[in-house]
Image (cartoon, helix red, strand yellow):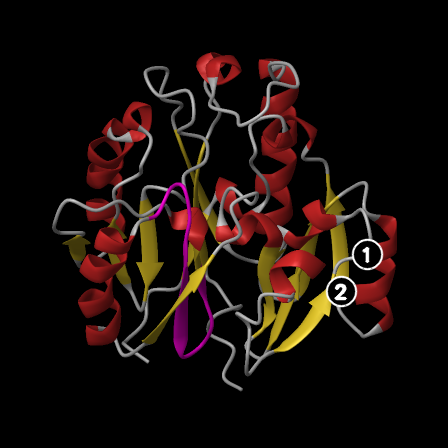
Amino acid sequence: MSGHSITFTHALCRAPSRSVTAGLRAEDRGAPDADLFAREHAAYVAALRRTGAEVTVLEPQEAFPDSVFIEDPALCLAGVAILLRPEAPTRRGEVAALRPDLSRLFPEIRDLGGPGCVDGGDILCSDTEVMVGLSARTDAAGVAALRPIVEDLGYRMRVVETPAEILHFKTESSLLDPETILASPRLAATGCFSGYRVIETASGEEGAANAIRFNAPVFLSDGFPRTAERLDRVGYEIRQLPMSQAALLDGGLSCLSLRYSLRLKP
């Protein structure tokens, strides 16, 4: 396995704004604390940098409370930045705000055509395949527009149905290595990961599935000890990070960065 889906030279993050307290949430469990969010975000950035990657942190965007979740408006694939179209109207402006930064960092920018919507949180990429979950935030028209871009870059596309109670496909799944997926039992039970080895999160620890493999370590939100032990036992290097404030806005580890290496098509 080549592993370019888990090996990165760069990451792009955006610092949380003070307006993050007004971010979208499916269930109101209280507003995040902006100062604590900033500290947890800084710890996240530092952890990525310790793997040897170059991490760029963009200035906060007060006009867009959810813009700290930089993964949703774009996809970085095979050295190309693809600008997506978030479903939430309050997030549409994040795409235009991000374009100048991506244009500076990437030699090629592509735009999602048509009227459909795709959130980056619904896209999980392995070495050869792009899995896209249809959800409340990603529709069939958006997936149809994304398919030719993905296939032109040398990837297969797999379209799956995300259970209605799961916000984003990657809310409950992540790539541990090019052949292995970490997933919640309810998402794994749909059969959407056929052809991959699946490691399920421990009972009651579904939130652990929103992890990221970034170079050697697998980063896991803290508070999921049995899943961490399960992964450690099969040989993954686990590093746990506080994600309490992002979780209040239905966010997690994958949402907070665009991870990439500038290289030729696979």
Q: Earlier in the sequence, mark 2 or mark 1?
A: 1
x, y (%) of residue 243?
A: 67, 35
Q: Is residue 76 visible?
A: yes
Residue under label 1, please give it. Answer: 202
Left or right: where 87 falls relative to 125:
left
In the image, residue 142 lies in the stretch drawn in magenta: no
Pick the residue in front: 107 or 147: 147
Q: Which segment is the magenta one?
A: 124-138
In the image, residue 130 lies in the stretch drawn in magenta: yes
Label 2: how many Cα within 10 Å (few below 14, some 14–19, many 20+) = some
x, y (%) of residue 248?
A: 62, 26
Query: Could you tell me which secondary element the residue under label 2 belongs to?
Result: strand
In the rendered view, tell whether residue 20 sits above or below residue 79: above
Q: Amino acid at mark 2?
A: Glu
Q: Quadrant of the C terminus?
A: bottom left
x, y (%) of residue 131?
A: 42, 66
Residue under label 2, please give it. Answer: 237
